[in-house]
């Protein structure tokens, strides 16, 4: 039982990181009906921005964590927000009235550009880099053989806070209302005088900033980052978004936690499970598409002519 | 006579002067037998295939080409097969598969494994192997699909039922497999684990029974022909395995909007790679070596020609027109009675089969397989070939396959920049010329004399084409 609880805690912490990425996918899909393939790589850039913020720009390795962490997070969020804006403005916006396949290929191109550009020796280099120990490695709480590390607590609390902030933003502000309107019916929102371009930029900035947080947290948790780290977590976060019903923000969060828990449980309890860690998510994707393509919380929407 | 008239007012009355056949059919049609027509339009194929003999001699035995060049020529051939088969999926049916390397891996490993493990002198034994495989996979897939179907249907009772059942069955499966791990043969109440163990037994059982019988049949064949026949069987078997994999991935995803396929295929290719990396009989991460080198120039380029022919003929057949219609507008296609899912799955499965065959070729000329070779990069490379060449243009895909396979060999110092340039080309192409180098035209359309008289069908990435207008 103790081991099970311990695994639950691990699963929640993994799921929280997926949730931060998944929200970006689901919001962009909501407004543009586009799978933003580059999102996982924005997450990677966020991790590297965090790394450079700690080691090069601010020299925060020695600073106390309550000072370093917010500064690092805000820097990473700003950089990724700008990156998200630039990607949308220069790669996706010119293709707004093109077929979706064109935009999808462009998204894959942007993702490749970020991945392979980052691997170039003059940028980040292909070898993994250690991420500095931002948070104290001690256990924050331990009882009965269950250990909760500070990292896990910070990840979980930060994710929940950001999600609450996001839902406030989406539900109670004018921009959030506009975002929901664009997501509901693009053309009609435009007719209602909503500046859709601005809302789309806003969505990308918001999603990318959340991905940046996820990137920094990933670095803190796993202590190692590399230019291809965005690929698999990005795909899994997308699967989490599909699992929860794509376009549905709360669904994406729940889907991410379900996915994180399943993954951790498979690794912990299945024979040879750790080798199939990355396979679990895709099996879930195939099964959910077979059984309930609209996701656990999605409504079935018939395509209209 | 009047009765007939009333039955069929459009037809001229039977007793009246019968109009000559030419009113309805072209005059020569009656005099040309279908056999002759087939011969007349296909006479070049056997000729080209015959040309492979001297070409094969030139590449292998004449000494004009060294082994390094030979390897590149073979790689170009495999790239061409992959690009053309992906063209069927991405260009002609307008879907977007990002996991072509996965199908290639399935074909490569599942054709190389039996060839290496069983006796190449026993072609019928290889048939038995694939039959055993088909039995096991078929039973598994059948049972799983039945379960999923029931879960899906439970939505009619209450909308929450599928989600709930899915979670319950999933948890049951995990608990079952986890708790049965400590048994050699799980007791009967571990339904899932016991079934898997039984399936493995079934596979071994079928082989144990059929291998000796197959060996007896094989002895009737001339000894010299046996390895060749084995290779052919293994190629087709590997291709069929890839096609089944395509069916498993395609059936659930192709019913949905196009972009799910990209993720699902990408995920599938990743699963395949993970499974291979962790599977002892397939050599794990160190790879599988010692595969007999059976594929020579003739085989590989024979495969290229067959691939091109299959894709070309499908694209220009009635089915192919239906596939293109689905690509252009699914709803309109469905409205005139074309089943969108059926046609998308058809193109996808044929494409996967051809990729599997290409994988088999690759395995049998390089003689060594490594899961690393079938990663995301490989899939992306094929996608880049198809997209840059022009979605829908078979000759465009061939040209880019040749260029993109030989170019890195010529520019060795370029390695760091290669993928960056690919990515930039992909984005630039989509922004400036979304239809790719050739659009959906073929190379001979550029020569006025040979140009098709009709306007070419739009490529799925041109603004007037493509089924998915932005929301």
Image (cartoon, rainbow, N blue to C red):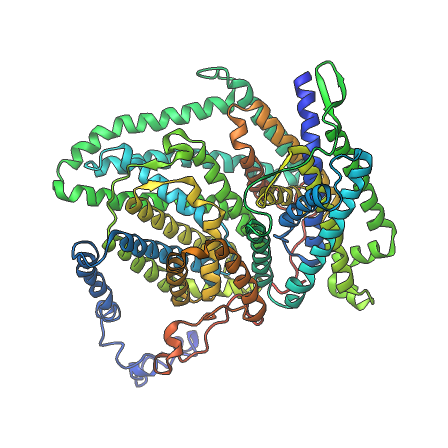
Q: Where is residue A211 drawn, in percent x and y? A: 70, 46
Residue found at the very far top of the displayed protein: A144
The residue lying at 12 percent from left, 38 percent from top is B220
Q: Where is residue A144 drawn, in percent x and y? A: 73, 13
Q: Where is residue A289 drawn, in percent x and y? A: 58, 44
When asked about the image quadrant of residue A145, the answer is top right
User: B321 or A221, which lies in front?
Assistant: A221
Q: Is residue A43 visible?
A: yes
Quadrant where the N terminus of chain A lies?
Answer: top right
Judge left or right: residue A150 versus residue B185: right
Judge left or right: residue B136 versus residue B417: left
Judge left or right: residue A197 versus residue B59: right
Q: Where is residue B395 drawn, in percent x and y? A: 38, 67
In the depicted structure, whether residue B386 falls above or below residue B158: below
Q: Is residue B2 visible?
A: no
Quadrant where the C terminus of chain A lies?
Answer: bottom right
User: A71 or B35, which lies in front?
Assistant: A71
The residue lying at 55 percent from left, 50 percent from top is A121
User: A57 or B206, which lies in front?
Assistant: A57
């Amino acid at each position: 039982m103790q081991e099970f609880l311990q695994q639950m805690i691990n699963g929640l912490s993994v799921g929280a990181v997926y949730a931060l990425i998944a929200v970006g996918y689901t919001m962009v899909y909501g407004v543009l009906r586009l799978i933003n393939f580059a999102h996982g790589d924005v997450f990677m850039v966020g991790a590297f921005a965090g790394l450079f913020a700690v080691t090069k720009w601010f020299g925060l390795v020695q600073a106390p964590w309550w000072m370093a962490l917010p500064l690092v997070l805000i820097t990473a969020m700003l950089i990724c927000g700008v990156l998200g804006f630039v990607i949308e403005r220069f790669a996706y916006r010119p293709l707004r009235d093109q077929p979706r396949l064109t935009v999808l290929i462009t998204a894959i191109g942007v993702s490749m550009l970020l991945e392979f550009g980052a691997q170039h020796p003059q940028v980040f280099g292909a070898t993994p880099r250690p991420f500095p120990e931002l948070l104290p490695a001690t256990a924050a709480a331990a009882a009965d053989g269950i250990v909760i590390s500070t990292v896990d607590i910070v990840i979980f609390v930060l994710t929940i806070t950001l999600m609450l902030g996001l839902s406030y933003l989406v539900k109670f502000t004018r921009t959030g209302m506009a975002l929901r309107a664009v997501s509901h019916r693009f053309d009609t929102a435009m007719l209602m005088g909503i500046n859709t371009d601005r809302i789309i930029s806003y969505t990308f900035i918001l999603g990318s900033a959340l991905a940046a947080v996820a990137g920094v947290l990933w670095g803190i948790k796993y202590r190692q980052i590399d230019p291809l780290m965005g690929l698999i977590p990005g795909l899994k976060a997308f699967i989490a978004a599909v699992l929860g019903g794509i376009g549905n923000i709360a669904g994406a969060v729940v889907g991410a936690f379900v996915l994180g828990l399943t993954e951790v449980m498979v690794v912990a309890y299945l024979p040879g499970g750790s080798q199939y860690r990355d396979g679990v998510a895709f099996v879930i994707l195939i099964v959910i598409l077979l059984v309930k393509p609209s996701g656990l919380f999605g409504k079935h929407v018939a395509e209209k002519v | 006579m009047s009765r007939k008239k009333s039955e069929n007012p459009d037809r001229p009355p039977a007793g009246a002067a019968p109009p000559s056949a030419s009113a309805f059919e072209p005059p020569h049609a009656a005099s040309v037998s279908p056999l002759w027509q087939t011969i007349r339009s296909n006479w070049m194929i056997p000729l080209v295939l015959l040309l492979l003999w001297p070409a094969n001699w030139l590449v292998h035995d004449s000494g004009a080409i060294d082994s390094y060049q030979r390897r590149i020529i073979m790689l170009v051939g495999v790239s061409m097969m992959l690009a053309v088969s992906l063209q069927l999926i991405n260009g002609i049916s307008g879907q977007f598969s990002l996991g072509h390397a996965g199908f290639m891996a399935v074909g490569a490993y599942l054709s190389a494994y039996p060839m290496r493990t069983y006796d190449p002198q026993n072609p019928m034994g290889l048939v038995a192997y694939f039959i055993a495989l088909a039995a096991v996979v078929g039973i598994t897939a059948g049972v799983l699909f039945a379960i999923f179907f029931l879960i899906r249907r439970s939505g009619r009772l209450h909308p929450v039922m599928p989600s709930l059942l899915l979670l319950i069955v999933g948890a049951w499966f995990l608990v079952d497999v986890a708790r049965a791990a400590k048994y050699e043969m799980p007791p009967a109440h571990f339904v899932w684990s016991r079934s898997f163990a039984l399936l493995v037994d079934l596979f071994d059982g079928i082989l144990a029974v059929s291998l000796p019988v197959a060996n007896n049949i094989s002895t009737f064949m001339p000894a010299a022909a046996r390895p060749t026949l084995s290779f052919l069987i293994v190629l087709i078997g590997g291709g069929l395995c890839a096609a089944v994999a395509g069916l498993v991935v395609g059936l659930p995803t192709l019913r949905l909007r196009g972009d799910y396929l990209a993720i699902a295929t990408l995920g599938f290719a990743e699963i395949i790679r993970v499974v291979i990396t962790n599977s002892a009989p397939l050599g794990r991460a160190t790879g599988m070596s010692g595969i007999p080198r059976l594929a020579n120039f003739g085989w590989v380029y024979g495969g290229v020609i067959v691939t091109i022919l299959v894709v070309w003929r499908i694209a220009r057949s009635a089915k192919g027109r239906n596939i293109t219609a689905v690509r252009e507008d699914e709803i309109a296609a469905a409205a005139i009675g074309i089943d969108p899912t059926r046609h998308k799955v058809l193109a996808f499965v044929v494409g996967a089969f051809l990729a599997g065959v290409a994988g088999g070729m690759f395995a049998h000329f390089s003689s060594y397989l490594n899961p690393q070779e079938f990663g995301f990069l490989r899939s992306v490379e094929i996608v880049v070939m198809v997209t840059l060449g022009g979605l829908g243009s078979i000759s465009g895909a061939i040209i880019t396959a040749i260029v993109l396979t030989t170019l890195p060999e010529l520019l060795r110092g370029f390695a760091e920049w290669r993928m960056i340039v690919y990515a930039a080309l992909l984005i630039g192409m989509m922004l400036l010329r979304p239809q790719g180098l050739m659009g959906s035209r073929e190379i001979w359309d550029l020569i006025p004399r040979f140009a098709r008289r009709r306007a070419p069908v739009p490529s799925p990435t041109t603004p007037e084409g493509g089924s998915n207008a932005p929301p």
